[in-house]
Image (cartoon, grey):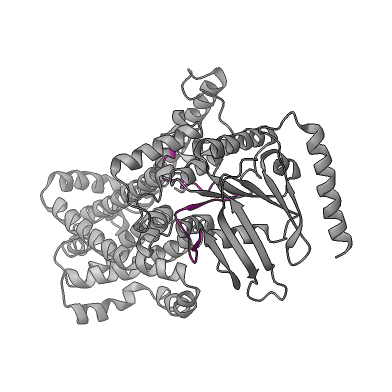
């Protein structure tokens, strides 16, 4: 367990309903994330995982509920949170380095000196192992490299919380495993917390300190597991296997009773 | 998204392999074939001109006065003389000013239409209506409003070319990756930052494609526009040669108009290829 003292991100009573839809996407949802903790929001498609992440990121205002980062109420996007999307979303007219730097000089971002900015860019690119590809355009990057670049773009902002919306979903299995290892390394190196949205149970088992299982409709928590195993966990198959069965049966029960 | 599969490592640095060389040779062959066929087509055109005027028409007929055997020497004289460059420069300036006005108005309006469904619904019928009126029908009105000289020509060119620029700008805005806009929101971008750092670079290819269409239209309507109330330019020169009964010069001027138009389009295509590869 790597959890530090006190929650960095807290949400209370989050409800969300999209206009024109009768059923709410989220109802009265509570959530908290400790410092240096990796929490996975796991669940089938359409259960509100990504919506919840957007609410946490300040990209989507909830119908009700409050979000606090380090005790401070959050009403809009916040520089201490960085969101990584399903697609890398790199800008094709910028090379990799400029993509990583994108947004650092925006008016509403914290002011950085030129030197400080360059240091951050260099560190972020080095962290994801793309030093050799700085001048490449997005069209010259593989899927995995593009996703690394998108992660570096988040890291350059030195967020305290990384919000990851199925960032590895479109990658092949080997690249995906590499990205999971990279995520663990990043979280350890930079001492950030992370919320990962995924529907892949194995991914959740490998990277999370805690798994929150969402199910039913509207989405609500149907189970929660704390995984107290050292990472990386490639060798802990037997322990994880038991958890896997547990999660799957919880999910199945929730479906039956719905 | 334009993410491609992993390029074979170091394939960009290593000397080209045999298949790559082969592919390059094929490409070269295809290109030279295109060039040869294109020249052949131009040759057929020239031959048809010659047949229609020198061979089939009777020597005393009117058509014979437009023959290439007279026009080509006249072309040589025009190219070495001092009149023609003046007319060409005047015409090019009018096209450029007219296009600049069309870009300055068309791009912002296009962005507005592309961004707002409301603006789109409100303006589409009016713009479709205006677009379908030949700009030349405004000529008398333009002359009365702007007076004789360059101003009505600027107006007419701008009026004719604003539509493709506006429409392709709007299409470009609609084709922006929604995730880029989400990214700019997550970075707390101001409106100006979103516009200048995402929207404008993101639609550049579409704008240039619209500008390329616009250049073609501008060059086509320029000549009739210059036939009214001006004393320089290629359109004026056409009428001038007619009045002087200098038919070989008239044909030579038509040739020049075609060549410049061809060059303008190639230039525009090169610009699109340079700044928005894959869209030319």
Question: Which residue is most to the left?
Answer: B82
Let me know if residue B32 appears in the view: no
Q: What main secondary structure does the magenta stretch of the protein show? A: loop
| Residue B73 magenta-highlighted | no
Query: Which residue shows up at 48% across the image and 48% down it?
Result: A159
Answer with the quarter of the image where residue B110 lies.
bottom left
Answer with the quarter of the image where residue B214 lies.
bottom left
Residue A209 lies, in percent from the top left, at 67, 43
- Given residues A247 and B73, the one toward you in this image is A247
**Residue B33, relative to residue B187: is it above or below?**
above
Residue A193 lies, in percent from the top left, at 56, 46
Residue B31 lies, in percent from the top left, at 46, 33
| Residue A83 magenta-highlighted | yes
- Given residues A38 and B176, the one toward you in this image is A38
Answer with the quarter of the image where residue A186 lies.
top right
In this rendering, position of residue A206 left or right of residue B123: right
In this rendering, position of residue B280 left or right of residue B218: right
Let me know if residue B156 appears in the view: yes
Question: Which residue is most to the front?
Answer: A5
- Given residues A31 and B44, the one toward you in this image is A31
Question: Which residue is most to the right?
Answer: A256
Query: Which residue shows up at 26% across the image and 68% down it?
Result: B225
- Given residues B222 and A171, the one toward you in this image is A171
Which range of residues does the magenta coloring cover? Answer: A71-96
Query: Which residue shows up at 60% across the image and 57% down it?
Result: A53
**Residue B236, relative to residue A84: is it above or below?**
below
């Amino acid at each position: 367990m790597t959890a530090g003292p006190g929650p960095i991100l807290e949400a209370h009573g989050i409800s969300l309903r999209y206009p024109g839809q009768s059923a709410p996407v989220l109802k009265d949802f509570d959530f908290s994330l400790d410092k240096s903790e990796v929490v996975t929001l796991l669940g089938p498609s359409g259960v509100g995982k990504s919506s919840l992440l957007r609410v946490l990121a300040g990209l989507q205002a909830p119908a009700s509920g409050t979000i606090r980062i380090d005790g401070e109420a959050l009403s809009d996007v916040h520089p201490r949170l960085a969101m990584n999307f399903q697609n890398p979303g790199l800008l094709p007219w910028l090379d990799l380095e400029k993509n990583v730097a994108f947004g650092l000089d925006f008016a509403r971002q914290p002011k950085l000196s030129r030197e400080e900015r360059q240091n951050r860019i260099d560190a972020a690119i080095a962290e994801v192992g793309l030093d050799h590809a700085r001048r490449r355009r997005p069209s010259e990057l593989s899927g995995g490299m593009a996703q690394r670049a998108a992660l570096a773009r988040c890291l350059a902002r030195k967020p305290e919380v990384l919000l990851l919306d199925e960032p590895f979903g479109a990658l092949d299995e080997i690249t995906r495993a590499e990205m999971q290892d990279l995520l663990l390394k990043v979280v350890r190196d930079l001492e950030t917390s992370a919320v990962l949205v995924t529907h892949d149970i194995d991914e959740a088992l490998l990277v999370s300190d805690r798994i929150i299982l969402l199910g039913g409709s509207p989405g609500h928590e149907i189970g929660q597991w704390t995984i107290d195993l050292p990472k990386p966990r490639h060798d802990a198959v037997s322990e994880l296997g038991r958890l896997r069965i547990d999660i799957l049966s919880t999910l199945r029960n929730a479906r039956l009773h719905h | 998204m334009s993410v491609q599969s992993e390029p074979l490592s170091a394939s960009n640095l290593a000397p080209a392999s045999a298949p790559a060389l082969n592919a390059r040779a094929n490409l070269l062959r295809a290109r030279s074939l295109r060039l040869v066929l294109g020249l052949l087509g131009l040759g057929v055109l020239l031959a048809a001109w010659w047949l229609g005027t020198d061979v089939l028409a009777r020597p005393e007929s009117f058509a014979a006065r437009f023959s290439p055997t007279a026009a080509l020497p006249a072309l040589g004289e025009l190219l070495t003389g001092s009149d023609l460059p003046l007319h060409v420069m005047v015409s090019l300036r009018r096209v450029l000013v007219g296009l600049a006005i069309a870009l300055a108005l068309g791009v912002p309006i296009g962005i507005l239409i592309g961004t707002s469904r409301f603006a789109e619904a409100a303006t589409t019928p009016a713009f479709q209506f205006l677009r379908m009126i030949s700009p030349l029908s405004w000529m008398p009105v333009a002359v009365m409003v702007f007076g004789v000289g360059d101003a009505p020509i600027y107006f007419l060119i701008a009026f004719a070319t604003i539509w493709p620029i506006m429409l392709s700008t709007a299409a470009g805005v609609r084709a922006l990756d929604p995730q880029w806009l989400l990214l700019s929101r997550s970075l707390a971008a101001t409106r100006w930052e979103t516009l200048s750092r995402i929207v404008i670079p993101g639609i550049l290819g579409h704008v240039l494609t619209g500008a390329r269409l616009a250049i073609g239209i501008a060059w086509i309507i320029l000549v009739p526009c210059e036939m009214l109330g001006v004393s320089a330019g290629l359109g004026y020169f056409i009428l001038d040669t007619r009045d002087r009964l200098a038919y070989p010069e008239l044909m030579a001027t038509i040739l020049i108009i075609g060549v410049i138009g061809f060059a303008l389009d190639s230039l525009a295509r090169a610009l699109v290829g340079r700044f928005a590869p894959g869209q030319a």
